[in-house]
């Protein structure tokens, strides 16, 4: 039914667009900013990749363009997103964690990032200390 399914056609950017538009309508520029923010700047798609993709997805009936320029997901797009989230759970870079084990894995990833980029996180030292204290409180209260 969907020729773009399967690992070869995973299409991380396509999946992200569907994921984001399932939450709320957005313009292409909003999608670029959101992806950049969720990946802490590691992945910022260019307008040359986003807008042709949006056009293609619109032609496929996965999304539709609203009069105000924002795009929204369609029923077909929601079905494709569900398939992708189910089929590729655990490898999605932006979705909800599927388990506590996945959350711990994400936390380890952030710690590694903090170690690699200490200057970038320096201004958040107090926030990090608060989080550490909250986690220590949780651990202390376990019996």
Image (cartoon, rainbow, N blue to C red):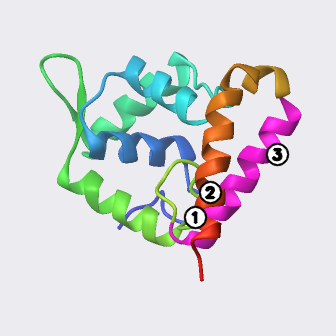
Quadrant hosting residue 65: top left
Q: For the residue labelled by badge 1, is the local secondary structure a helix, a strand or a loop? A: helix
Q: Residue at x 24, y 32 (%)?
A: 25
Q: Is residue 51 above or below residue 20?
A: above
For marks 1 and 3 on the same chain, the one whose residue lies earlier in the sequence: 3
Find out whether the residues at labels 1 and 2 contact each other: C-beta distance under 8 Å.
Answer: yes
Q: Is residue 31 above or below residue 107?
A: above
Instruction: Point out the frontmost of discs 2 and 3.
Output: 2
Q: Nearer the viewer, residue 85 or 107?
A: 107
Q: Is residue 58 magenta?
A: no
Mark 2 surroundings: few (<14), some (14-19) or many (≥20) residues within 10 A: few
Find out whether the residues at labels 1 and 3 contact each other: C-beta distance under 8 Å.
Answer: no
Residue that badge 2 annotates: 135
Q: Picture coordinates of residue 141 (x, y %)?
A: 57, 71
Q: Which residues are magenta?
A: 98-117
Quadrant hosting residue 18: top left
Disc 2 to disc 3, C-alpha distance = 18 Å
Q: Nearer the viewer, residue 139 or 99?
A: 139
Residue that lies at the very extreme toward the left in this rendered image: 67
Q: Quadrant of the N terminus?
A: bottom left
Taking the image as shown, residue 61 lies to the left or right of residue 35, namely: left
**Number of the label disc, if any, that sits on residue 112:** 3
Q: Residue at x 82, y 45 (%)?
A: 112
Q: For the residue labelled by badge 2, is the local secondary structure a helix, a strand or a loop? A: helix
- Is residue 34 visible in this depiction of the protein? yes
Q: Picture coordinates of residue 20 (x, y %)?
A: 37, 40
Q: Is residue 116 magenta?
A: yes
Residue that badge 1 annotates: 138
């Amino acid at each position: 039914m969907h020729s773009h399914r399967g690992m070869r056609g995973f299409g991380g950017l396509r999946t992200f667009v569907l994921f984001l538009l399932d939450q709320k309508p957005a313009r292409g520029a909003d999608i670029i900013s959101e992806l950049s923010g969720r990946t802490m700047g590691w992945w910022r798609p260019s307008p040359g990749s986003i807008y042709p993709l949006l056009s293609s997805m619109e032609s496929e009936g996965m999304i539709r363009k609203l009069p105000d320029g924002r795009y929204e997901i369609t029923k077909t797009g929601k079905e494709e997103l569900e398939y992708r989230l189910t089929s590729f759970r655990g490898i999605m870079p932006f979705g909800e964690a599927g388990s506590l084990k996945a959350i711990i894995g994400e936390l380890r990833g952030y710690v590694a990032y903090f170690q690699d980029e200490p200057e970038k996180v320096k201004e958040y030292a107090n926030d990090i200390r608060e989080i550490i204290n909250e986690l220590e409180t949780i651990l202390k209260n376990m019996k």
